[in-house]
Amino acid sequence: MPKLVWIVIVVVSGMLVPVQAGLNAALKKGTQNALLAGGWNTLLATLLFITALFVVRTPLPSLAMVTALPWWAYLGGVCGASYVLISLLCAPKLGAILLIVCLTAGQLIASVLIDHFGWVGYNIRPLTLSRICGVLCMIAGIYLVQR
């Protein structure tokens, strides 16, 4: 598939982020329980995962493969659960645009550091002046959006 197709897929997927945050926040508001709302999100993801195991029939890795992974490889779920909980708590307070601009700024800051140092399995891509300017523009965007 051409790179542009992948870019479009990711942009469309990114469009779901404020929708997800709003839906989760509405569930929290209706139930008066942030953990229940976050748990519901996680339960649905778990059911999707279990269904995929039976439908796709991907072979499970061996115990040797699982134990050979670095300890930090298992923290993706913690990141995802934290993101869901923080988003559903902050969405009503910030609104969709400020929530997403702040999330995106955090993603950009982490991304330039991850690329520069080659953390969590990424190839090293040195920090450049244009990347620094892009992050600074995003931080300026936070200021402009929240005014």
Image (cartoon, grey):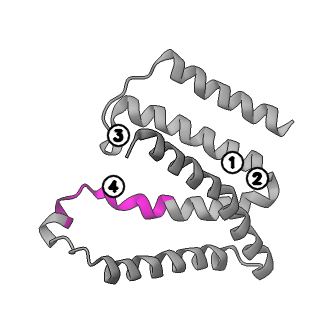
Between marks 2 and 4, how big is the CA–CA gap?
31 Å
Side (left or right) of 147 relative to 38: right
What main secondary structure does the magenta stretch of the protein show? helix
Are dots 2 and 1 in contact, CB under 8 Å?
A: yes
Identify the residue position indicated by label 1 in the image. 100
SS label for mark 1: helix
SS label for mark 3: helix
Residue 119 image label: 3
Q: Given the image, on which type of amino acid does mark 4 rest?
A: Trp
Q: Given the image, on which type of amino acid does mark 1 rest?
A: Ile
Badge 4, how many Cα within 10 Å: few under 14, some, many 20+?
A: few
Identify the residue position indicated by label 4 in the image. 72
Q: Is residue 65 above or below residue 100?
A: below
- Quarter of image, res 28: bottom right
In terms of sequence position, does the residue under pointer 3 or pointer 1 come before the other?
1
Q: Is residue 88 above or below residue 114?
A: below
